[in-house]
Image (cartoon, grey):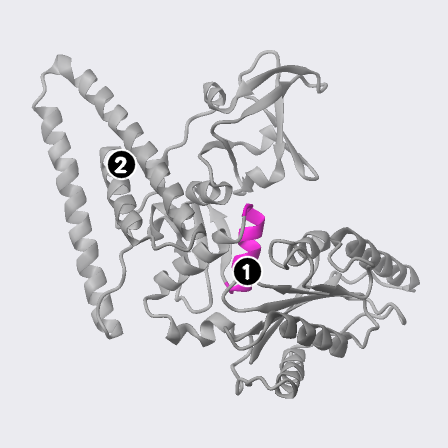
Amino acid sequence: MAVVKIKAIRSTLGKAIGYITDGSKTNSGLMCSSNCSIVPGMAEDITANMELTLALADHSRRFGKPPSVVAYHVIQSFKPGEVDPNDAHDLGWEFAMAITKDEYDVVCATHLDRDHVHNHIIFCAANRETLKRYRNPKQNLDALQNLSDNLCRKHGLSVIERPGRGKSLESIYAQTHPGSAKERLMNKIDEAVRTSFTWEAMVASLAEMDVKVRPKGVNIIFAEPDMSRPIRGRTLGAAYTEAALMMRLGREHVAEFSLAPRMVHIKGDQVRIRIPGHQPPAYFRVDASKLVDHGSTYRLFLSEAGDVTVTDRGGKIIAPMAVADLYHYFDPPQPARELSSAPHSPSRGISAKQQRFFAHVDRQVSALRDEIDVVNTLADYDATTPNQRAAFIDNLGQKVASLDAIVHELILERQNRLDAGLPVKHVGARLAKASRQRRNLA
């Protein structure tokens, strides 16, 4: 059986096509087919041809503004284990041709990076024969689902009896995945990070699973239809903060910087950043994938072991600078503020009421442990003489830095085990304990 979704693409057409044709997801492009490129997995050619068709369609218009929709993205997800990847791709291309009648520029890519095979179909919004626009009324989703169902029956696959408008494959099979909504969300994030190496790729991968991601203040917010309200990454644990996710995506330690918009100039895939307080005025460039827009601020994540090339206003190279040395000009991050006061723990209980009760008890016990840790530390501080207190505070700072390093190592160890398909439960327990100690000492 297959679940179908459709959404409009209004911008970043090239990025969308580049994502679905990514060789790491499509067996080096072998699982791609297109009617507008000699090489089916060549994202640049496909994008150029679609943009040419759109330009011709806009030129043929006699009045009015060009429509905002440039293409449509259809996702066809199959039940895990029910279909062979090659058969899924053949069915996906047949589905694409049934939708477009071969009158629209189209690309079909079959992704193999999850436990369920799924097809991505992107087709140009303008008909290349008539130059008229594709119409996608609300009832079109039902028509596409029926079309997919007929193809599934033709190929001997099962069919879902009316799954509900826009319902995702993950939602349909949620009952087969035990645990709370938070645990399922954590599993989705882990899966997205396992198959991604940039923030944009992770966000796109989560979008396929009906999870929306947005920054808010110092937090990253995750939302999905099955949850009653959005949830902050830090409430899921230390491995789900923004800094931790950037570390996991790069599989390396990262240095984090907070930037005012006036310090940032974005041009294409490159970002020029002004170094505050540096005389004479100096700048360095980074890839846009290292920057996350928080609205009133930007957050930059660079490899902790790397360096940047410092230039003057005209672009003349001044000297290389270690990333760690940038903290002479930027305020260091405050990781403790991103940690939850009650780290997430697996749900207990059978009924929903029992699970809520045990979750309440777990939060109370965790809060009590935190209070004991803080009170004991304050008692130790009060027991010192006035001339020893500066050294006591300095020692606490060293302990926080040490725990910070341990937390980062455990986050990377956890990700390495996820990449290798190994269990992470014991690493998660050590990570929760270390992050709690770090937060309380801070």
Which residue corresponds to mark 1? 113
Residue 68 vs residue 282: left or right?
Answer: right
Residue 156 vs residue 434: left or right?
Answer: right
| Residue at the (28%, 33%) spot, across then down | 403
- Would you say the residues marked 2 and 1 are in contact, meaning their CB atoms lie under 8 Å apart? no
| Residue at the (16%, 42%) spot, across then down | 371
Image depth: mark 2 or mark 1 in front:
1
Residue 38 falls inside the magenta stretch: no
Identity of the residue furthest to the left in this view: 383
Look at the image and give the residue range highlighted in magenta: 197-210
> Quick one: quadrant of the C terminus?
top left
Q: What is the secondary structure assignment of the residue under circle 2?
A: helix
Which residue corresponds to mark 2? 438
Count of all numbered marks drawn on residues in the image: 2
Tag 2: residue type? Arg
| Residue at the (23%, 33%) spot, across then down | 441
Q: What is the secondary structure assignment of the residue under circle 1?
A: loop
Magenta span: helix, strand or loop, mainly? Answer: helix
Tag 1: residue type? Asp
175 vs 306: above or below: below
Please name whichever residue, 381 or 172, is drawn nearer the observer in this view of the structure.
172
Residue 321 vs residue 267: left or right?
Answer: left
> Quick one: quadrant of the N terminus?
bottom right
* Rendered image quadrant of residue 440: top left
Please name whichever residue, 296 or 34, is drawn nearer the observer in this view of the structure.
34
Give coordinates of residue 192: x percent, y percent.
50, 55
Give coordinates of residue 349: x percent, y percent.
21, 70
Give coordinates of residue 433: x percent, y percent.
24, 44
